[in-house]
Image (cartoon, helix red, strand yellow):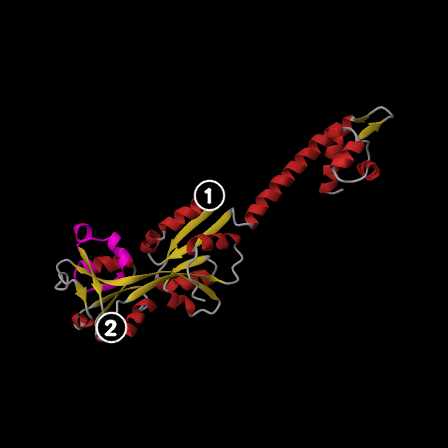
């Protein structure tokens, strides 16, 4: 006995006419009669009484019909639920970010994902720059936001470029550079540079050296800090200056933080920072494909 067999029985029990039931099930009346007879032999009791005038359910048949309906309804619900899992409509996705800033700039995408897939648990995890790739490789996160240079070092990663933003310099409002309209490389010769991240310089910062930042970080005092919160505190205290994408301007102003954001231009080139999303190519979480579709849209894949 299988699910299809139960479905045939339910139709026959509701129609009480084997010919009509067979037609509805797209089988012959003979096949329906043989199927019911085989089911009765397997069960060990009669489901129907038959005479020339009518077909009726036995008392055992009536009871079995109720239970069979319950089984089929549970089966149908199970199929729908499992299909939703396969389609990524339900489940969990873990997203790791280097700071809350990335969460803010992609908040519209996160909201859209939550609205479209309300039954998916969207978990946000904040990790230092140097732990983003490891968190994805270990399976603790399905996808990470961060610098594409960091992720492209891992051949098993797929990386999607999400946006590029001009770099701005951050300094305290009392800093001698605070009144500048644009920062050039010669202004930074004697400046201490604040670097977010406990494990050295993120790849995004290193890329500044390739686009005209002539002093080179090795000639400046580098102040390593643990996270973006400490970065902002150290900058506001005037202990050094730092670089962030210019979307930070929407979250920081001298009126609210005592930090000034100034555009940069090194040898006529505006430095840019790229934000990307990286994930393992063999990730089997069905939710991930839906998340990437909303996150990237028609954006350009790096590789």
Identify the residue at horizontal 42%, vertical 64% (top origin): 133
Residue 223: image x %, image y %?
A: 24, 67
Give the quarter of the image for residue 260. Answer: bottom left
Q: Which residue is mark 2?
A: 213
Q: Residues within 10 Å of mark 1 (few under 14, many from 20)?
A: few
Q: In the picture provided, is 285 more to the left or to the right than 174?
A: right
Residue 196 versus residue 73: which sits nearer the camera?
Answer: 73
279 lies above or below 14? below
Q: Where's residue 22, x and y in %? A: 78, 36
Seen from the viewer's position, the closer of residues 21 and 13 is 21
Disc assigned to residue 118: 1
Residue 271 forms part of the magenta stretch: no
Magenta residues span: 235-258
Any mark on residue 63, and which?
none
Residue 20 found in image quarter: top right
Q: Residue 209: image x %, image y %?
A: 28, 73
Q: Earlier in the sequence, mark 2 or mark 1?
A: 1
Secondary structure, mark 2, is loop
300 sits to left or right of 20 = left
The location of residue 291, given as percent across then percent down, is 46, 53
């Amino acid at each position: 006995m299988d699910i299809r067999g139960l479905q045939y029985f339910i139709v026959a029990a509701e129609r009480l006419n084997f010919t009509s039931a067979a037609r509805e099930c797209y089988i012959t009346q003979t096949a329906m009669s043989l199927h019911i007879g085989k089911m009765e032999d397997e069960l060990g009791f009669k489901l129907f009484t038959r005479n020339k005038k009518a077909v009726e359910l036995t008392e055992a048949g009536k009871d079995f019909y109720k239970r069979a309906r319950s089984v089929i309804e549970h089966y149908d619900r199970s199929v729908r639920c499992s299909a939703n899992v396969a389609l990524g409509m339900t489940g969990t996705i873990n997203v790791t970010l280097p700071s809350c800033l990335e969460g803010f700039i992609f908040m519209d995408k996160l909201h859209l994902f939550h609205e479209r897939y309300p039954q998916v648990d969207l978990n946000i995890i904040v990790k230092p720059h140097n732990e983003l790739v490891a968190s994805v490789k270990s399976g603790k996160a399905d996808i990470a936001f961060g610098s594409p240079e960091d992720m492209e070092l891992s051949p098993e990663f797929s990386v999607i470029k999400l946006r590029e933003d001009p770099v701005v310099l951050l300094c305290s409002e009392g800093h001698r550079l605070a009144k500048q309209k644009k920062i050039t490389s010669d202004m930074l010769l004697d400046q201490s540079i604040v670097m977010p991240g406990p494990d050295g310089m993120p790849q995004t910062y290193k890329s500044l050296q390739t686009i005209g930042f002539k002093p080179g970080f090795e000639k400046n005092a580098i102040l390593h800090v643990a996270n973006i919160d400490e970065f902002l505190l150290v900058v506001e205290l005037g202990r050094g200056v730092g670089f962030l994408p210019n979307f930070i301007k929407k979250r920081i102003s001298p009126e609210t933080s005592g930090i000034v954001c100034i555009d940069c231009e090194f040898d006529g080139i505006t430095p840019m920072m790229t934000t990307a999303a990286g994930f393992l190519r063999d990730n089997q979480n069905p939710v991930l494909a839906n998340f990437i579709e909303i996150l990237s849209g028609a954006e350009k894949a790096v590789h």
